[in-house]
Amino acid sequence: MNDFSPLTATERLCQLGPLDILVVAPAGCGKTQVLAERAASLVATKHVESPRKLLALTFSNKARDNLAERLKQVMPSRDRALVSVTNFHGLAGRLVRAHGAVLGIDPQIGFPERGTHERMRVAAGINYKVKSMRAKAEVANQALFAAKTGLWDDEEVLLRIADSRSREAVNYQQALQDANLMDYDDLLRYGALLLNDPRVARLYREHFSAVLVDEVQDLSPLQLGMVQAIGSGRTTYAGDLAQGIYGFAGARPKKVFDAIKESAPEIINLDLSYRSSPEVLAAVNALAREMGVAELRCARPESWQNTVTGVEFLVSEDEIDEAGTLLRDFQQTLAREPTVSIGVAARRFDRLTPLVKLLTTANVDYQNWYRPAYVPKISHVLQRHLQEATAYGPDSATQLAKLAQLCRHEIGTEDASSHDELSVALEALQEVLDEGASLVQAVLASRVVAADTDAPVSPGLHLLTGHAGKGQEFDVVYVVGLEEGHIPDFRCSTFEEFEEELRVLHVMASRAKSRLTFTRVENRYRTPTWYAAEVPSRWWSTLTGERP
């Protein structure tokens, strides 16, 4: 194992040809820049030459767009043409469209759209909104997820779902197949199945000279298998075990890291943070020690000397008290520093309900990241086609249908993730229209201030969950709700689940640049007849240094 500073790590990567390399990159260490430099060096040193290309795989749309933007900074356009940047769903969509017929998959099968599938789930009896149906809905979701995480065809999937004895899951999957549709789990399963076919895998191994993979801690074993089918022996993996927070979506961070380490002759550790102040890093490192992962050092401690920095702990009587204190803090901070960005993160968005009500009453502007229309790419696509859509017809229903058509055409047929995000955004717009707003008002209300997907978070107040905030950074961060039942979540029961909750807390804390505040309340549930005392989160004392 070799340890390098980020600059030396980049130089070291640029010296190496295509081979399996693991870059351990904690939050704020410049991972995206390192990957971009790695891509540029592979092309510049002729390890990637036309007609072959380099495949850069990401877990999310934002990570894809961020890497693509960073490549523009380090590579001329002629070299960038040799790099194919996509996420796993995009790769799977390309495989299905181009090669689905090899395994009897209809190449024109419908891609995932969350709104459509949600309606199909409700029709099949999978409905969390009806209290009496929640238990059956949970069983059905578990059965569907378990049946689609292996290299199994549609017939085998139906048999496995049937074995679960969930009639709702069987009805849903049968309805999908009858409608020639697939969901996200199906899409990845199809992609993995196709790359498991030697004929298809050979084509992609010959087409791509090398592979880069970002955020490897978010990969499922199925996704790792897709990578290895294309790039075994010539893949650069980058990620951080401490940021593995997608276990509910199939990610297996430890299993994936262990598998990569078995094949990677080079392991490079980045240990300098270019994001956070020394005070913030002290809190982040306290959580890192609890997890047993590497701690970070501030790359430029002198650069923070003229900046207000620090870590604070806020204990309130109840959530209403807390909301009032936070509102005063926000108003004072923004009055003093109008360009500051403030991230308010909770494990679940419902923990922020009292704060949302108070902000609304006080007429304080904020961006709600819980609303899907705030995805920058989708917001920009909606705005680009708004004028043409509103000129198409006199009523909002006709205009919205035209807007959907125009946006889907621009996104293209292979970008399954963006189609899904668009579907959710359109449903959110419909809700605003149902309240009496015009389409123009609905779309403009969903706009984001950032000029592009790689721009810093816009100034002002942002409300989000720990999962939504991953990959972002804010000048000031409030981590709200360090109470047992919220952080960690009350649904946790296994050691692995509590481990992931600690990683969620670590991700929220590591979003902060200059200042970081953790909050908890003494009495979260307060009514005239019931007064329930809260227990501080098990990690409160880790952060404060107090005895539990």
Image: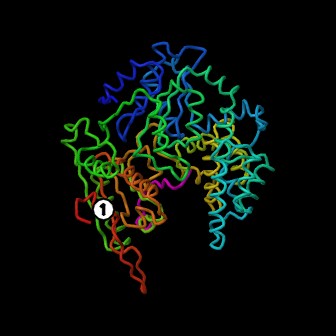
126 horizontally vs 19: left or right: right
Is the residue 160 above or below the residue 82 in the image?
below
Task: State the image coordinates of residue 426 (x, y, percent, origin top left).
Answer: 64, 51
User: Magenta span has 337?
Assistant: no
Asked whether residue 451 appears in the rendered view, the answer is no
469 horizontally vs 87: left or right: left
SS class, disc 1:
helix
Task: State the image coordinates of residue 465 (x, y, percent, origin top left).
Answer: 45, 55
Q: Residues within 10 Å of mark 1 (few under 14, many from 20)?
A: many
Task: State the image coordinates of residue 223 (x, y, percent, origin top left).
Answer: 57, 39
Decide which of 288, 420 is in the foreground and name it.
Answer: 288
Asked whether residue 394 appears in the rendered view, the answer is yes
Decide which of 333, 438 is in the foreground and name it.
Answer: 333
Is the residue 325 above or below the residue 426 in the image?
below
Instruction: Give the quarter of the figure containing the N terminus.
Output: top left
Q: Which residue is mark 1?
A: 540
Report the number of discs: 1
